[in-house]
Amino acid sequence: MTAVASESPRGAAAHPRSIMRRAWLAISSARKRRARRCTTAESAPASRSMGYSCHRMGAGEAVQGRPAPRRRCARKLAVLATAVTALVAPATGSAHPSVYTGIGKVVTSPPNEPIVLDDQTRYVVSNHGHSYVMTESNLQLGQGVIDYKQLPEAFRETILTAVMLELGDTSVQAHHTCRTPELEEESAITGWQERDPVTDRREPAFGYVPFQKDSAGLGDDPDEWLPVVETLTGVDLATVSDDPVAARTELQTLCEGLPEPGIFVPADTLETSAADFSSATIAAATSQLNGQIDLLEATVESLNAQAAVLQGTLAAGNGGQVQAQGSLAAENQALKAEISKLKLEGTRLAIDSVSGRSVKLTGPAGKSVTIRMVMTKAKAKRLRLKSRVVAKATGRIGADAGATIPFKAKHKALKQGSLKVTVRARSKDRVASTRATLRR
């Protein structure tokens, strides 16, 4: 990875390095467009040729029905390691994704054979403060996460969204996808993604429509793309299994079973789990609280030791001994209660169940909590409703870190008998959500 020189003022002469970079981008775009113009005769039968690439750009063998990855020049793994170190530092919450690419080595020879090394493309993907390391595994050329390092803000203001998708394109896919004409239209790709709050135009983070029901953990919300997929293909991804292995099989069957069969492309392999990146964040958030608990527990132990000494000294005393013991016992009891309170205040917010007309949850003791229930955009549009909100409720979490919040859902959508909603709970900086079905 190389550093990019800062942008020159508007109207100034273009820097030579900037000219070379734009030329490289133009060449890369031309190569991708040429790779996608593979004819039906050249593609293998299993690929259900849809005009996509069926050969590798450069040396190497073709992969039937799917484009092969671009050949990238080798970079030192130390540089990639530096990028990873920078990304796992406290995140600044960037609203646009960045992709760092490097080449590693893997052993491809069978056991007990001479060792053969081959290149393996690796990516570090960062978006909305979330960072993951992924490896190229689906051999999908382009139509991946959009790299905003290639799209400075001043440059983005001068180009169309279609140009952003072209110039910022990468080959790392964080989600499963289904390659079918309906889902590869620009309107479908950009329609589910967020708008810039200043310019009110789409600034896509992904060059595709995900074909799965769960988030990839990169600040993406399934509630945004699930209605788009159902509208364009008739497939309700919310019914797919929660088991990742079973879900992948079901998704492939659904994709290939469309009236115009699609090509199912699994996501690239995730090398780091969410827990790996969350552990440091959780430790940083709770370290101060744990320090207070440790200090209070040490104080309790010290007071217990003092109480033991005083009890021995005052064994032959009079009524003052009883008073001292009562005072120490009260202090011990107060400190223990404070420790229990701090532990309850650190309880994670979670929705346990939604039944009848109430929501049962656990969270930080004594804190207020707000409940919102919303339907999907597609459902609201079908019912011609201006608001997606079905019900709201507020309450306070009890001293035992538990609460049952009643709600009243008065909505004409319930006249149909049942309604699928997303239940969201918020208590200050803590949030939790789940899906539920409301019945009349």
Image (cartoon, grey):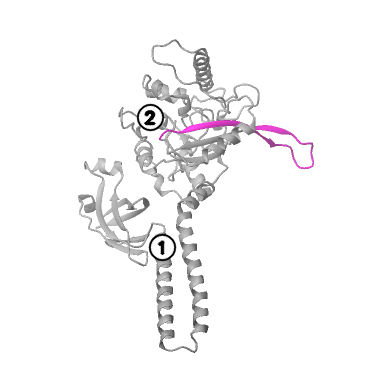
Count of number-bearing discs: 2
Instruction: Name the spot of residue 198 as percent of width and height, x first.
Output: 30, 29
**Helix, strand or loop at mark 1:** helix
Can residue 291 be seen here?
A: yes
Q: Which mark is residue 203?
A: 2
Instruction: Name the spot of residue 281 as percent of width and height, x first.
Output: 48, 48
Q: Nearer the viewer, residue 351 or 394?
A: 394
Q: Is residue 322 above or below residue 115?
A: below
Quarter of the image for residue 120 reads top right
Mark 2 vs 1, N-terminal side: 2
Q: In the image, is 214 to the left or to the right of 85? A: left
Residue that mark 1 sits on: 342
Give the amino acid type for the residue marked by disc 1 in the picture.
Leu
Q: In the image, is 114 to the left or to the right of 328? A: right
Q: Residue at x 39, y 57 (%)?
A: 349
Q: Nearer the viewer, residue 222 or 402?
A: 402
Instruction: Name the spot of residue 168 as percent of width and height, x first.
Output: 46, 26
Q: Is residue 403 above or below residue 202?
A: below
User: Which image quarter is the C terminus in?
Assistant: bottom left
- 152 falls in the magenta region: no
Q: Residues within 10 Å of mark 1 (few under 14, many from 20)?
A: some
Between the C-alphas of marks 2 and 1, the distance is 42 Å
Q: Which residues are magenta?
A: 95-120
Give the amino acid type for the residue marked by disc 2 in the picture.
Glu
**Helix, strand or loop at mark 2:** loop
Q: Nearer the viewer, residue 208 or 160?
A: 160
Q: In the image, is 275 to the left or to the right of 258? A: right
